[in-house]
C-alpha cells in the first residue's frame, strides 16, 4: 500500500468556490491558491480577483500575489496600487516592495509617473532594492514632491545607488527638508561618502532642532571620517540628549583627535552608564596618555561594563 | 483507573460573529503549533479544545477577519 | 476504540526531513537544489506555515559573521571561550565560514535584515570582542518566506504527522521512520535513504515556575523528539549535562532580548538599577552571574529601559511586540508594567536541551552527520554550540547537501516488519486502553521531578533520587491512557521527555566537576577539573536500554587561543565554588 499524503486543494474546486455569491467564501478560495501548487492558474484567478466587488477579496488577492512571480503579477499589483480601498493598496505596495526581480523595473518606473503620492511612494520603494540606474532621474525629481512620504522614498532610492552624482541632492535633503524624518534619512544616507562636503552637512545636522536627526548626525560623523567634524562633535558632547552624546563619543573615538580627551574625560562622570562606557572606549581609541587619569577613576566604576572598557582602554594607552 | 473532568478557562477566545470557518476557512487551526484549535462542525466556528497554549499568536495574527483574541493563560498572567 | 487503520501504510523517499521549523525547510530546499531528481519530503508535527521555534519570526541574528565586522577565526575563539573550551572547533568554523553566504541567501529570498540608508547590513556591536548582531525589525515574515521556498522547489510537505521512532537497516544504516497522525491516530512508515532530524530543542523538560505545562521558553511542541529518536536509533549525543537555561521576563516565556534593547541603550540590572554582568558572551557563566544576583541581596534582576527616551521606548515596543513573542505587550499590560516607568522583573527559565543556546545535542560533524550512517541532525537538536537561528539555517543547508550526495551512493535499506509491528503497538497502546492515567498528569509529575532533582545547582544525591523517580514513572507508562488521537500525541511526547530526563541525569552525574557556570554547577564537585574533564561527555543507549556515558577527546583546535584570549577568559570567570550561597 502506498500513501500519498496529498492534501493540496484542487484548482477546479477552488474555482467553483470562487464562483460563490458570498464574499467570505470567495476570499477563502483565494487564500487557498497558495497551497494549490498550480502557478499559472493561480495567478490567473488571483489577478481576476483584484477586480472583485468586495474589498476584502481584493486585499487577499493582492497579498496572495506576493507568493507568485512574473510580469502578470507585477502588472496587476501596480494596477492595484490605485484601488479605492486602503487595505488593498497597502497589500499591493507591500508585495511590490518585496519583489527582487530587476525585470520588473521598467513597468514600475512607468507607474511611478502617476501623480497620486501613495502610488509614487510605493513605486519608489519598489525600485529601491533593484538599484536601477534609470531610477536616478525620477528619484531626483521626486525629492521636490510636496508629500514627505514621496521624498523619504526618493532619498532611499538615491542612497541605494551610492553615486557621488546624487550627493548634492542628498545633502540638500539632510539640510533643508521640512520633514525631520526625511532630514534624518538624508543624513543617514551620507554614510557612503568620505568627503569634506558630506562632513559639512553632518556638522550642520548636529545643530538640527530634532534630537533624532542630531543623533543620526553624531553617528554618521564617525563613519564619514573627516576630521573637520571634531569641533562640532565636541560641542555635541553637551547636547541635551544623552543619546546624542553617546553617538558623538563613539564618533570622536573613530576620529582619534586628542582634542576630544577633555570632554570625553568629563563624560566619565555623567550619570548614564551607557555614555560612560562609550566615552571610556573612545579614550582608548584615541590612546592619548592625557586620558589616563579619567580612565583610572573609571576602572572603579559601579558598572562592570564601564570598568571593563576602562581597563581595556588603559591597556591600549600603555601599549601605545 | 477512574477519571474525572475538570474545567479550565482557556486563553483563545473566538468571536463567532466574525469567524468564517463555516465559509471554508481553517487558518487558525492550520497555524496552531500545538494543534489545540478545532472547528465545531455544528456551529461552523473555531474554538479552543485543549488548554495547551503557547500564546504565540499566529492564530490571532493570521485570522483573516480578526475573530480571535488570545489572552495570557491565567496561571501566568 | 481506535480510529487508526489496521495496517500501517508506507511510502518511500530519498531524503526525509523531520521537522519543518527553521533548519528543516532549508535542508529540504538545499537537498533538492543539489539534486532536483531526489524525492524530498518534510514531515511536520504541526503545519510548516507556523511551526518551530520561530513561528512568529525572529527579531535579529546574534551570531552573524560578516566581513568587515568579524572574522570566522574571531568567532570560533569566542565560542570556544564561551563554551569553556569544550568544542569541536571544526563544526563552529564550518558555521562561521558559511554564515555570510547564508545571510545573503536569506536576503535574496526576501528576509528583511536591518540595513543602513544605502542598503548595507546594519551590524550592531553588543559584545566587546567582535560585532555579530544584525537586527531584523521586520523579522515576522520568516516562516512565510521559508514556506514560499518549499512551494517553489516543489517539496512534499506532510503536516500533522509526528515521527515516533526511527528504523535502522540490517547493517545499522538509517532506513525510515514510524509516523503518527495527531488528528486521526493513523500510523504510517516512511522508508528513506537519509533522515535529517530538525526537531528543535527539548523544551518541555523542566517545568516553568508558573506550573503551566506549555508556558515554556521553547515552543512546547519541541518535546525532545529528536534527542529521543536519535538515542533509540543508536546515535551518540553530546553535552547533555550542559543544559539550556535562559534569562526571561518573570512568568512570561519571552527572552530578555538584550540583542534588541542593548543597541538601543537598555540593559540587565539589579534592584539598584546597576549592571552586574561581568561575562562578555552569552554562556553558562553569564547565567551563573544572573542566578547569583537573582538570589542575592541586590536581587532580583530587571530589564532596565526606564532611562530611555520616549521615541526609543516606542521603537523597542514595536520590535518586541511584533516579532518572536508578540503577546509580550499584553502580559505587561495585565501587570501594569510600562517600560517608561518601571524596570521589568526577570527570572531564569526551566532547564532544557538546546545547542542553539548552549551545547546539548545529537553529536554531529562539520557536515551535520551523526554517528549513524544516513542520519543527520541540524538546528537546536544538533551539537554545534551557540548556533542560534542562523546556525540552524547553515547546518540545515550542510545536511541537505551532504544527504543528497549520500543518496547517490546508497540503496534504500530494508526495515524489519516485526520491528514495525512492535513500534506500532507501543505507540498506539495508550489509545487501546479503556482507562488509566492521562499523559498530562504523568507529564506534570515528571517535569516537577526534573525541577526538584536536576535543576542546577546540581547535587549528586538529589540526581540519584531523581533517577529513581523517573524509573517509577517509566513503570507507570504501562497504565497511560489517551482518550483521543490528540492525547495520543501528548503520550508519545511524554515518552520523549522521559528519555531526555534520564539522559540529563546520567550525563550530569557522569561529569564529576563543575563547568559552564550555572549549566553544570555541581555543588559537591565545585571546581573545574581540566585534567580529567577537558573532554566531551557522550551519551548512547546501553544494552539494558538505559543511557551509558563515555568520554570523547576534543579534536585539535583549528584556531589556537593566544595567551591574551586565555587571560581575558580567566578574568571573566567568577570562582564558581565560592558562591553557592
Image (spheres, coloured by chain):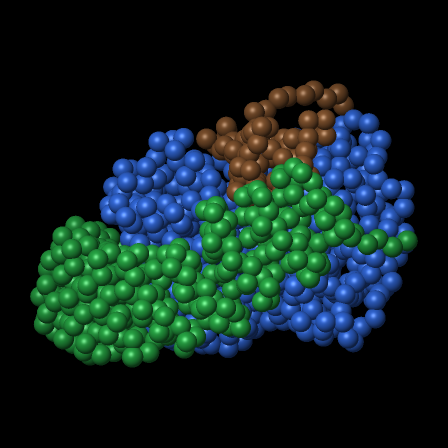
- Who is closer to the viewer here, C282 or C285? C282
Q: Which chain is green?
A: A
Chain C painted colour: blue
Q: Nearer the viewer, residue A147 or B49?
A: A147
Does the image show residue C274?
Answer: no
**Is A281 located above or below residue C434 in the figure?**
below
Q: Indicate whether C349 appears above or below A259.
A: above
Task: Give the camera-side residue of A112 and C123.
Answer: A112
Question: At which x and y percent is residue A67?
Answer: 60, 58
Q: Nearer the viewer, residue C501 or C197?
A: C197
Chain B palette colour: brown
Quadrant location, the C terminus of chain C = top left
The percent coordinates of residue C534 (x first, y second) are 52, 65
Q: Relative to residue C156, is residue A31 depicted above or below?
A: above
Q: Is residue C81 left or right of residue A263?
A: right
Residue A25 visible in image: yes
Residue shown at 20%/51% (left/top)? Answer: A272
Amino acid at each position: 500500500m502506498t500513501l500519498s499524503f496529498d492534501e493540496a486543494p484542487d484548482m477546479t474546486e477552488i474555482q467553483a468556490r470562487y464562483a460563490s455569491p458570498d464574499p467570505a467564501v470567495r476570499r477563502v478560495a483565494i487564500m487557498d491558491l497558495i497551497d494549490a501548487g498550480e502557478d499559472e492558474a493561480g495567478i490567473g484567478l488571483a489577478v481576476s480577483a483584484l477586480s472583485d466587488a468586495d474589498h476584502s477579496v481584493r486585499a487577499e488577492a493582492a497579498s496572495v500575489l506576493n507568493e507568485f512571480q512574473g510580469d502578470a503579477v507585477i502588472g496587476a499589483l501596480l494596477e492595484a496600487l490605485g484601488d479605492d480601498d486602503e487595505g488593498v493598496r497597502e497589500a499591493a505596495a507591500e508585495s511590490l516592495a518585496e519583489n527582487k526581480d530587476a525585470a520588473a523595473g521598467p513597468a514600475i518606473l512607468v507607474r511611478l509617473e502617476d501623480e497620486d503620492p501613495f502610488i509614487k511612494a510605493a513605486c519608489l520603494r519598489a525600485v529601491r532594492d533593484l538599484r536601477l540606474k534609470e531610477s536616478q532621474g525620477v528619484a531626483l525629481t521626486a525629492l521636490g514632491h510636496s508629500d514627505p512620504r514621496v521624498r523619504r522614498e526618493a532619498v532611499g532610492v538615491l542612497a541605494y545607488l551610492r553615486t557621488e552624482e546624487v550627493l548634492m541632492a542628498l545633502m540638500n535633503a539632510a539640510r533643508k527638508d521640512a520633514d525631520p524624518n526625511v532630514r534624518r534619512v538624508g543624513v543617514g544616507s551620507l554614510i557612503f561618502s568620505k568627503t569634506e562636503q558630506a562632513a559639512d552637512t553632518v556638522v550642520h545636522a548636529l545643530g538640527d532642532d530634532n534630537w533624532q536627526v542630531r543623533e543620526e548626525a553624531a553617528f554618521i560623523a564617525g563613519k564619514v571620517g573627516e576630521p573637520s567634524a571634531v569641533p562640532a562633535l565636541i560641542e555635541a558632547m553637551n547636547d541635551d540628549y544623552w543619546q546624542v552624546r553617546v553617538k558623538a563619543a563613539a564618533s570622536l573615538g573613530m576620529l582619534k583627535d586628542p582634542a576630544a580627551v577633555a570632554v570625553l574625560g568629563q563624560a566619565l562622570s555623567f550619570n548614564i552608564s551607557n555614555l560612560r562606557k562609550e566615552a571610556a572606549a573612545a579614550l582608548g581609541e584615541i590612546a592619548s596618555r592625557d586620558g589616563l587619569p579619567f580612565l583610572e577613576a573609571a576602572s572603579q566604576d559601579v558598572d562592570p561594563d564601564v570598568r571593563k572598557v576602562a581597563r581595556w582602554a588603559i591597556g591600549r594607552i600603555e601599549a601605545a | 483507573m477512574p477519571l474525572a473532568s475538570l474545567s479550565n478557562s482557556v486563553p483563545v477566545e473566538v468571536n463567532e460573529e466574525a469567524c468564517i470557518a463555516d465559509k471554508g476557512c481553517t487558518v487558525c487551526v492550520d497555524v496552531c503549533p500545538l494543534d489545540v484549535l478545532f472547528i465545531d462542525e455544528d456551529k461552523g466556528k473555531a474554538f479552543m479544545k485543549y488548554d495547551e497554549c503557547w500564546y504565540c499568536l499566529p492564530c490571532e495574527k493570521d485570522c483573516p477577519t480578526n475573530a480571535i483574541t488570545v489572552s495570557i493563560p491565567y496561571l501566568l498572567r | 476504540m481506535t480510529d487508526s487503520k489496521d495496517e500501517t501504510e508506507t511510502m518511500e523517499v530519498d531524503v526525509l526531513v523531520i521537522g519543518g521549523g527553521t533548519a528543516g525547510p532549508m535542508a529540504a530546499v538545499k537537498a533538492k537544489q543539489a539534486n532536483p531528481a531526489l524525492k524530498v519530503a518534510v514531515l511536520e508535527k504541526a503545519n510548516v506555515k507556523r511551526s518551530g521555534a520561530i513561528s512568529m519570526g525572529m527579531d535579529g541574528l546574534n551570531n552573524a559573521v560578516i566581513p568587515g565586522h568579524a572574522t570566522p577565526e574571531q568567532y570560533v575563539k569566542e565560542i570556544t571561550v564561551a563554551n569553556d573550551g569544550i568544542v569541536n572547533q571544526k563544526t563552529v568554523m564550518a558555521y562561521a565560514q558559511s554564515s555570510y553566504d547564508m545571510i545573503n541567501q536569506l536576503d535574496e529570498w526576501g528576509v528583511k535584515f536591518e540595513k543602513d540608508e544605502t542598503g548595507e547590513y546594519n551590524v550592531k556591536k553588543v559584545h566587546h570582542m567582535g560585532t555579530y548582531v544584525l537586527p531584523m525589525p521586520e523579522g515576522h515574515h520568516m516562516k512565510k518566506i521559508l514556506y514560499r521556498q518549499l512551494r517553489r522547489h516543489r517539496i512534499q510537505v506532510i503536516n500533522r504527522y509526528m515521527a515516533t521512532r526511527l528504523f535502522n537497516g540490517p547493517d545499522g544504516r538509517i532506513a525510515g521512520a514510524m509516523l503518527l497522525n495527531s488528528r486521526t491516530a493513523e500510523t504510517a512508515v516512511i522508508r528513506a535513504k537519509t533522515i535529517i532530524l530538525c526537531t528543535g530543542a527539548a523544551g518541555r523538560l523542566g517545568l516553568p515556575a508558573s506550573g503551566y505545562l506549555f508556558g515554556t521558553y521553547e515552543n512546547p511542541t519541541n518535546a525532545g523528539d529528536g534527542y529521543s529518536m536519535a538515542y533509540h536509533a543508536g546515535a551518540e549525543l553530546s553535552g547533555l549535562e550542559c543544559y539550556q537555561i535562559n534569562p526571561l521576563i518573570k512568568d512570561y516565556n519571552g527572552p530578555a532580548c538584550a540583542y534588541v534593547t542593548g543597541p538601543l541603550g537598555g540593559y540587565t540590572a539589579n534592584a539598584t538599577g546597576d549592571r552586574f554582568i561581568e561575562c562578555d558572551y552569552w554562556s553558562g557563566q553569564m547565567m551563573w552571574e544572573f542566578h547569583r544576583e537573582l538570589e542575592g541581596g541586590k536581587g532580583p534582576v530587571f530589564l532596565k529601559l526606564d532611562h530611555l527616551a520616549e521615541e526609543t521606548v516606542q521603537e523597542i515596543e514595536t520590535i518586541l511586540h511584533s516579532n518572536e513573542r508578540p503577546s509580550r505587550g499584553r502580559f505587561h499590560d495585565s501587570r501594569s508594567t510600562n517600560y517608561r516607568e518601571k524596570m521589568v522583573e526577570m527570572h531564569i527559565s526551566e532547564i532544557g536541551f538546546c545547542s542553539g543556546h548552549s551545547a546539548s545535542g545529537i553529536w554531529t560533524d562539520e557536515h551535520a552527520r551523526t554517528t549513524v550512517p544516513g542520519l543527520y541532525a541540524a538546528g537546536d537538536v544538533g551539537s554545534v554550540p551557540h548556533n542560534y537561528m542562523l546556525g540552524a539555517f547553515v547546518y540545515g543547508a550542510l545536511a541537505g547537501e551532504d544527504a543528497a550526495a549520500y543518496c547517490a551512493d546508497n540503496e534504500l535499506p530494508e526495515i524489519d516488519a516485526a520491528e514495525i509491528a512492535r513500534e506500532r503497538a507501543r505507540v498506539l497502546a495508550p489509545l487501546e486502553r479503556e482507562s488509566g492515567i492521562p499523559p498530562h498528569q504523568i507529564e506534570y509529575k515528571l517535569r516537577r521531578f526534573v525541577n526538584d532533582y536536576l535543576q542546577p545547582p546540581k547535587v549528586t544525591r538529589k540526581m540519584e533520587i531523581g533517577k529513581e523517580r523517573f524509573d517509577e514513572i517509566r513503570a507507570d507508562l504501562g497504565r497511560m491512557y489517551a482518550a483521543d488521537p490528540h492525547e495520543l500525541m501528548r503520550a508519545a511526547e511524554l515518552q520523549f521527555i522521559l528519555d531526555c530526563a534520564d539522559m540529563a541525569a546520567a550525563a550530569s552525574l557522569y561529569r564529576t566537576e563543575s563547568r559552564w557556570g550555572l549549566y553544570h554547577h555541581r555543588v559537591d564537585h565545585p571546581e573545574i577539573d581540566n585534567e580529567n574533564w577537558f573532554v566531551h561527555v557522550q551519551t548512547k543507549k546501553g544494552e539494558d536500554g538505559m543511557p551509558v556515558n563515555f568520554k570523547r577527546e576534543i579534536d585539535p583546535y583549528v584556531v589556537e587561543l593566544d595567551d591574551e584570549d586565555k587571560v581575558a577568559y580567566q578574568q571573566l570567570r567568577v570562582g564558581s565554588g565560592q558562591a553557592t550561597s
